[in-house]
Image: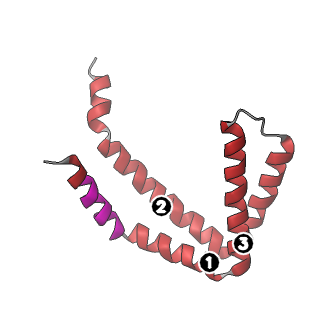
Amino acid sequence: MNIYDSANTLEQDLRKTTEVAELKLAFEAVKANDLAYKLFDKVQNKQFELQQKQMQGQEVTDDDIKAMRELTDQLSNYSEIQNLMEKEQKMNSMMDELNKIISKPIAEIYQDK
């Protein structure tokens, strides 16, 4: 048995889940609202910028945090983004469960000391 075949099957099965379908629809709704999508894009870019700063050993300043907070506070003004975040949470929960299942053999190695 090839483990990569199993992974590819899992990928195909994930595509058929309700969680993925709902996430896709939620993201399409965000993209359909120009203002919501521009804000969503701004938040993602700011997150990337702050991650880059951290990875380069630069300090994330209070102004950086304040700017990010102001952007994320604006997200709640859009029901499309709130819905997307809800669908992302459901997807993340499913991925966490799958990760626990997949990594069980490794976890068991360390549990059986």
The magenta segment:
6-16
79 or 32: nearer the viewer: 32
Asked if residue 108 lies in the magenta stretch, the reply is: no
Say left or right for 57 vs 70.
Answer: left
Say left or right for 69 vs 47.
Answer: right
Q: Which mark is residue 70?
A: none
Corner quadrant of residue 13 = bottom left
Image quarter where the C terminus lies is top left
Eyeballing the image, is 96 above or below 110? below
Spot occupied by residue 81 in the image (x, y as percentages of width and height): 64, 70
Spot occupied by residue 106 in the image (x, y as percentages of width and height): 30, 32
Q: Nearer the viewer, mark 2 or mark 1?
A: 1
Residue shown at the point (49%, 70%) measured from the top left: 23
User: Which residue type does callout 1 highlight?
Assistant: Lys
Looking at the image, the residue that sits furthest to the top is 113
Residues packed near mark 2 inside 10 Å, few (<14), some (14 to 19) or many (20 plus): some
Q: Which mark is residue 31?
A: 1
Eyeballing the image, is 82 above or below 102? below
